[in-house]
Amino acid sequence: VLAPSLDARFRARDRDADIRFELNAEKLMRLRKGLPDIPMAMSGHFVESREKFELREFKSRIGKTEVSGSVSLARNDKDKGRLEAELASPHLDLTPFIKKEADSEAKSQSAGAASAPSKKVKEPAKDEKAKYVFSEEPISFGDLTRTDAKMHFVFNEVKLDARMLKDVDGTLTVDAGQMTFEGRARGGNGGTLDSVFNLKPTSDRAADVNLKLTVKEMRAGLGAGEGIDPSQVPPTSVEAHLRTSGGSARQMASSANGLVLLTQGPGKVKSG
């Protein structure tokens, strides 16, 4: 059995560094317990200078998933630097990771049931705070004011079990304390998705949030089951315009206001 291997070549001078690396693993699970049993290969060129850190010519293949791109972090005299990332993938398959997590959870529950005593044990009283669906724990937004970043990704195909998205294009920007995400995609069996998310802190402990989501005639695999062609699943459309504010998940959930309209066309769904 082959162990993970790392090949690196580097040269350094003063504060500058130039490193080219290759990392290979026959089985990803050998790098960390809980990861799926699939091969991995990764390579790139890391460059450090007085002006910035850069990861160039990054290429990664994990199972059937391929990702390439570049990342840079510009240095400055302030507490923050400018982070920029550009990622692309012809095929992003998340199925092995989701199935591994589901299998681990099922095994854990099975082992717990087997080792549990036959005598019923009184469960301890639940924490009073857990009675709410959304947490009341305050969210800190102070780090956003110290972050300057832009990440753009383009994925030709994103697969999650029976669900699939195509031509996924998204941009995440954090600037002057404000975070904005814009994304669009096509459904694997027709339809489109467009979204805009904006978060603007009003203080270190509160923020205003705006969400606009438009889904048109998408057959994303929701409701699909064994023996049902994903193309026969009912097309779903969603129009959502939501606005909220607060300093915790519960405050934001309770103050949410706007419009959500969901419609579904004819098709086949799994029974039961």
Image (cartoon, helix red, strand yellow):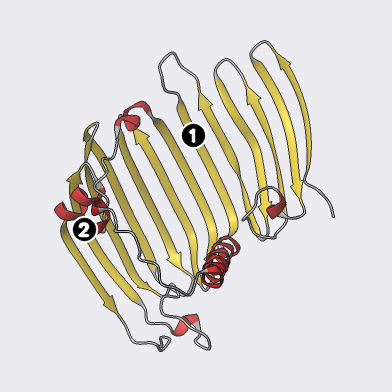
Q: Secondary structure at mark 1?
A: strand
**Compared with residue 42, is residue 216 higher up or lower down, i.e. above or below?**
below
**Sooner in the amino-acid sequence: mark 1 or mark 2:** 1
At 45% from the left and 85% from the top, the residue drawn is 232
| Quadrant position of the C terminus in the picture | bottom left
Q: CA distance from mark 1 to mark 2?
A: 29 Å
Q: Position of residue 231 (x, y in %)?
A: 47, 81
Q: Which residue is mark 2?
A: 241
Total labels drawn: 2
Labelled disc at residue 167: none
Disc 1 to disc 2: CB gap under 8 Å: no
At 17% from the left and 63% from the top, the residue drawn is 259
Labelled disc at residue 84: 1
Direction from residue 179 to residue 10 in the image, left or right: right
Q: Secondary structure at mark 2?
A: strand
Badge 1 amino acid: Glu
Badge 2 amino acid: His
Q: Position of residue 165 (x, y in %)?
A: 48, 65
Q: How busy is the neighbourhood of tag 1: few (under 14 within 10 Å), some, or many (20 plus)?
A: some
